[in-house]
Image: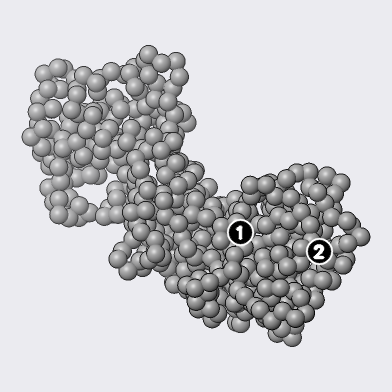
Amino acid sequence: MTLALPINIDSLLHRRTIEGERIEYKAGWNPQSVLATLGAFANDFHNLGGGYVVLGVEERDGRPVLPPKGLDPAAIDGIQKALLNLGNSAIQPPYHPLTAVHDVDGRTILVLYAPGGETRPYRTKVRLSASSREWAYFIRRHSSTVRARGEDERELLGLAATVPFDDRYHRNASLDDLSFRLIQQHLQDVGSDLLQEVAGLSMDVLGRRLNIVGGPPEALFPKNVGLLFFNDRPHEFFPATQIDVVWFPDGPGGDYFEEKEFRGPLAAILRDAVSYIERNYVKEAVVKHPHKPEAERFCNFPVAAIEEALGNAIYHRSYEEREPVEVRVTPEELLVLSYPGADRSIRMADLQRGEAVSRRYRNRRIGEFLKELDLAEGRSTGVPKILRAMRDNGSPAPSFESDEDRTWFRVRLPVHTAFPLTDETVREQFSEQDKQLKNNENSIHTPHDTPQDRHDTPQDAPQVARCVERLVRTLQSEMSRAGLQAELNLRDRRSFRETYLKPALKAGIIEMTMPDKPTSRNQRYRRTLAGETLARQLTDSGK
């Protein structure tokens, strides 16, 4: 019987979502070669989630040759029967891939889906002759199948009792905890042919096809990955499965913050959290140069870097630790914090350069689903993508941090240095007074602001300077935040902090009377010596 696989054929032939290490193309049916590759995928040495063997497609330099050569349709049934027999007699423990027949450009091809096995390591017969008694372990090395020897073989044997967490059965859940609706949505999102069959399948059959269900027929259980993606409330099975986004307008030590929690299926909370951050905290700015016709556009934080950092956190965090993924946003930086950290085999210096390569992944199945949905990168390409996104935006380089014991991992995305209200902008505003007052050179504005909005929340550097000047003129002796805001007739507390108070503090124009207790209710503000000088200059100039 022809089966539909949980991924579309276009992704396999054009390799848009599946990396080469997980695909092998073969022009024809060679039982010995196919068997070794199936054994290698079953062993899943790098915890990538197994792989695919595509029969009827030639390969050149690791890429499929299209249109395909194809197989004789009359031979398909015989190949499938041979695979069934060989899976029992030539692989130990017995192992059977899923198969699917496809018509591509008028040619018939056979796809074998070989997920990582649940009872690894798997031995495969070296030769299929009746007299041969030699068995060997095979693994994938880049895009090739090789025999495991020496240290590789010892390491593979050591994986016998270490099924990754996301691929384990959840014995406190049942198949009723898996949602048909969420599975259908996923199959639609990835363009799977299996979508056409869902209505006629029971959950046990559908779950096995997706490899999110396991166990003997009389005692089937959902796998952890199934509950994480296809249950509406996975946090009830895995506490702290959530993303917390926290905004600190005054920094982590401030007395005000906004927090939003995202709970639900992993793909949904990842999309929703990125969308929420983009709507609320990502701002685009435009720099108009007097001698250039084109304006320069950039964001305070590039969305591509945020999406990749958050996707990596969902991919690589531990779901056995009761700690959420946290995103902390301040005017100066955006942090993505997850637990635990990167494997000890990865040097943080290599990670910072984008050169680190992970030998083994913590959540092979979670990564498989995220990559199918284009929500995460594979094969250690996520960090280079973050570096590239920050560089393309003109932002400072991100940093990747962890403690010595690798108990946590943090991605730090600094704000664009030319964006309004950053330290550098404020320093420039008050170090060169003549540049402050040029309204038409290198002005920075946010396209979505209206003139009325900008009265209380100006976005261009000269306007910020004028706001600080108003503050310095208004500040008499020592005044509270509320008193200053009322005196300036400003209703928006957040706008006052961002556009008046913080730039003046950072520029050294004013200071706190209680700097060791910045959030104290008795806090007051006063001019510094530089502030007194500026106030006199403003008075003398008649401003």
Q: How is the image coloured?
A: one colour
Asked if residue 349 can be seen in this view, the reply is yes
Q: Is 185 placed above or below 115 here?
A: above
> How busy is the neighbourhood of tag 2: few (under 14 within 10 Å), some, or many (20 plus)?
some
Residue 236 drawn at (x, y percent): 55, 73
**What amino acid does circle 2 point to?**
Leu
Q: Is residue 416 left or right of residue 233?
A: left
Number of numbered labels in the structure image: 2
Q: Is 287 placed above or below 133 here?
A: above
State the residue in front, 200 or 359.
Answer: 359
Q: Is residue 381 left or right of residue 331?
A: right
Which residue is at 60% across, 74% downward?
137
State the residue in front, 84 or 386.
Answer: 84
Residue 312 drawn at (x, y percent): 48, 56
Which residue is at 60% across, 77% downward?
120
> How busy is the neighbourhood of tag 1: few (under 14 within 10 Å), some, or many (20 plus)?
some
Would you name the residue on which mark 2 appears?
Answer: 3
Residue extending farthest top: 291
Q: Is residue 113 left or right of residue 249?
A: right
**Quarter of the image that includes the N terminus:** bottom right
Q: Is 343 placed above or below 532 here?
A: below
Disc number for residue 144:
1
Residue 314 drawn at (x, y percent): 50, 60
**Quarter of the image that includes the C terminus:** top left
Q: Earlier in the sequence, mark 2 or mark 1?
A: 2
**What amino acid does circle 1 point to?**
Ser
